[in-house]
Each structure stands twice: as structure tokens, then as C-alpha cells.
């Protein structure tokens, strides 16, 4: 799986985090309410996760990276969620996040919206992930439950993951509506943490619902580019962009600042129960958008198989 490095995140207590996020989000959204609550039961609608919560030994894993996707894809880069759970010393973890599928499993490229309870002892993994791909007929979005077609827990190239024991517990509830600034929901929280905590990295993960409005998402095409994608413009011409409608359930991981591990600072993938999903960029309906999310800070961050040669292309 490649080398693993790790560091301890700064972990502010939840009331403090709520206060910091409340002030930061208010600069970008008209109505904001951030509070500390008991995590709602995430096995229920609209989440349908395999576990109840996102608490217990929270950690983040940044696996692989964009340099394995562009300029040219590294098809040999295949990882496994059960192996990642062991590598981050949390076998049986509930892992959510954003990544790419394994080309070896699907025979093509697609977005992976991760929600997996990793295997533990003789208990098999429960894979509640979704795949968003481009339809070969028509070029639209096709969203499928991963376990409807595949039995493994593999992924490819890169993933940004939040892992926990999947337990109930206290979380940060963030409700924000009517966007007044330029920042998307996740960037606004991440940049708020960066400006407040400076060089102390704070990492968070969780799930949020875009309850009203529409959002700009992308899906990677099924075929990798055969000519090198050397700039953000090349990457954006290769990706397929869509405007998708609420409700979208989004799996999100973000870190306030990179202490030198070539991290992807934020990454969010969304699924729905109406056939749409992909990689979140921002909402496209600032006047009507409504977000509701549940997040928890991570204690540790693991950097797995960090690319030796890196660049800043395609990190949006
Ligand atoms: Zn993505």
C-alpha cells in the first residue's frame, strides 16, 4: 500500500469549534446556526449509513493523490478500505469520504462516494458506498449503489477519508442557508479554521445535506485521458460538469492547513436517492440554498502512499 506517515491534529473542544464556525460561516451565509448536538441516527433517512454515528477515535486518511490521476493515470494504484482501516489502527472503522473507483474492479473510471464499515474479525465489511459514472448512452449521470454490482472494498488513485468507530455521540451540527459570499460550504468552514487556528492543523469529517437548491458537481469520464493533463484548464476540459438538484447527501473531509504532507485540503462527494451524485464544487442557487451537516474533529491524520512527485493541478 505504500508508506504511511501520521501526525496529531489540533483538537479544539466542540463548544469552541461551534463558536468559531458560527462566526466564520456568518460571513458567507445569511442564516447560520452552529451547535453541539447528539449525532442523529445515521442509519435513518436520508443517510442510510451502515452505522449510527461518526464518533469514536476519529481520524483522517489521505490516500494516494491527484498526481496519480494527472497528468496521466497510474492504473497500478489500487487500495482497499479494510487495509486502510488496519493501517490507521482502527480495524472495523466506519469510513466515509471522497475518492476514485478501482479501475481493476469497474473496468473504467468513476467517482466513489464512500460509506463503508470495514471488516472486523470474522465480520464482513458493509459497503454502503455509491458510484457516480458517465452513462455510455447519452453522457448523463448514472448513480448506483456499489454493493449492487461489486463485492470488494477497493478504490483507486486517491481518496480522502474520515474514519471513526461509527458510534453515537456529540457532534457539531451546522445549519446554513442563503449564501452571501463566494465560498462554498466546505471551503468556508476550512478557511475559517485556518484563519483561527493558524499553523495548528484542525481536521474534520462528516456528512451534510444540501436540502434546497442546486449544486455544481463533476464526474470523471470513464476513460482516462491518453494525452497528459498538465493544467487546471486541461483537467476541467476532461471532467464532465453537471448541475444537480437537492436533496444531495455529501461525504466531506477537510483539513485547515497542510503541515507539509502534500494533503488535499478538502474533498466532498455527494449521493442522492434520485439518481444524481458526484464531486461537489459549490451550490448554484445562493438565494435558496440550505445546508445541514454533522461534523466531528479528527485526532490523527494518516498520509498513505503520498506521491513522490507532486504538483498543484486538479486540486479543486
Ligand atoms: Zn472528487
Image: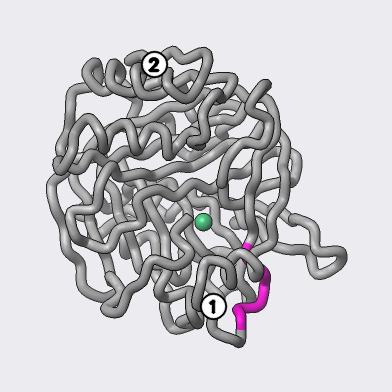
> Magenta part of the protein: which range?
220-225
In which quadrant of the rendered view does residue 63 lie?
bottom left
Q: Is residue 243 left or right of residue 225?
A: right
Residue 31 versus residue 43 in the image, above or below? above
Mark 1 neighbour density, 10 Å: few (under 14) some (14–19) many (20 or more): many
Q: Position of residue 224 (x, y in %)?
A: 60, 78
Residue 94 versus residue 258 in the image, above or below? above
- Identity of the residue drawn at 40% across and 48% down: 266
Residue 276 versus residue 12 in the image, above or below? below
Dot 1 or dot 2, earlier in sequence: 2
Asked if residue 150 is among those painted magenta in the image, a careful observer would answer no
Q: Is residue 96 left or right of residue 172?
A: right
CB of mark 2 near ligand 1 (< 8 Å): no
- Identity of the residue drawn at 63% across and 49% down: 217
- Identity of the residue drawn at 70% across and 38% down: 273
Circle 1 is placed at which residue position? 229
Return the mark for residue 36. none
Prevailing secondary structure class for the magenta stretch in the rendered image: loop
Mark 2 neighbour density, 10 Å: few (under 14) some (14–19) many (20 or more): many
- Identity of the residue drawn at 61% across and 71% down: 109
Marks 1/2: CA–CA distance? 40 Å
Circle 2 is placed at which residue position? 34
> Which element carries disc 2, helix, strand or loop?
strand
| Colour setting | one colour
Q: Which is in the foreground here, disc 1 or disc 2?
A: 1
Q: Position of residue 247 (x, y in %)?
A: 67, 31
Whether residue 166 is visible here, answered yes or no, is no
Amino acid at each position: 500500500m505504500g508508506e504511511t506517515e501520521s501526525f496529531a491534529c489540533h483538537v479544539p473542544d466542540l463548544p469552541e469549534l461551534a463558536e468559531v464556525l458560527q462566526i466564520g460561516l456568518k460571513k458567507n451565509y445569511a442564516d447560520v446556526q452552529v451547535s453541539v448536538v447528539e449525532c442523529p441516527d445515521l442509519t435513518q433517512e436520508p443517510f442510510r449509513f451502515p452505522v449510527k454515528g461518526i464518533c469514536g477515535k476519529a481520524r483522517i486518511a489521505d490516500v494516494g493523490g491527484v498526481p496519480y490521476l494527472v497528468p496521466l493515470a497510474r492504473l497500478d494504484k489500487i487500495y482497499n478500505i479494510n487495509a486502510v482501516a488496519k493501517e490507521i489502527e482502527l480495524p472495523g472503522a466506519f469510513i466515509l469520504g471522497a475518492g476514485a473507483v478501482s479501475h481493476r474492479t469497474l473496468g473504467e473510471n468513476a467517482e466513489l462516494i464512500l460509506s463503508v464499515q470495514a471488516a472486523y474479525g470474522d465480520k464482513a465489511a458493509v459497503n454502503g458506498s455509491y458510484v457516480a459514472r458517465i452513462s455510455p448512452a447519452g453522457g448523463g449521470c448514472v448513480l448506483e449503489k456499489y454493493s449492487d454490482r461489486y463485492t470488494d472494498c477497493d478504490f483507486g488513485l486517491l481518496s480522502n477519508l474520515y474514519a471513526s468507530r461509527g458510534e453515537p455521540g456529540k457532534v457539531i451540527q451546522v445549519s446554513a442557508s442563503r449564501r452571501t459570499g463566494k465560498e462554498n460550504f466546505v471551503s468556508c468552514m476550512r478557511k475559517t479554521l485556518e484563519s483561527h487556528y493558524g499553523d495548528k492543523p484542525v481536521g474534520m469529517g462528516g456528512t451534510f445535506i444540501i436540502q434546497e437548491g442546486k449544486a455544481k458537481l463533476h464526474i470523471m469520464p470513464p476513460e482516462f485521458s491518453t494525452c497528459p493533463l498538465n493544467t487546471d484548464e486541461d483537467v476541467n476540459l476532461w471532467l464532465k460538469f453537471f448541475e444537480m438538484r437537492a436533496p444531495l447527501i455529501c461525504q466531506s473531509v477537510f483539513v485547515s492547513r497542510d503541515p507539509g504532507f502534500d494533503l488535499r485540503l478538502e474533498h466532498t462527494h455527494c449521493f442522492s436517492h434520485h439518481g444524481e451524485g458526484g464531486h461537489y464544487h459549490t451550490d448554484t442557487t445562493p438565494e435558496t440554498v440550505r445546508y445541514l451537516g454533522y461534523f466531528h474533529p479528527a485526532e490523527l491524520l494518516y498520509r498513505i502512499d503520498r506521491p513522490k512527485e507532486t504538483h498543484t493541478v486538479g486540486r479543486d
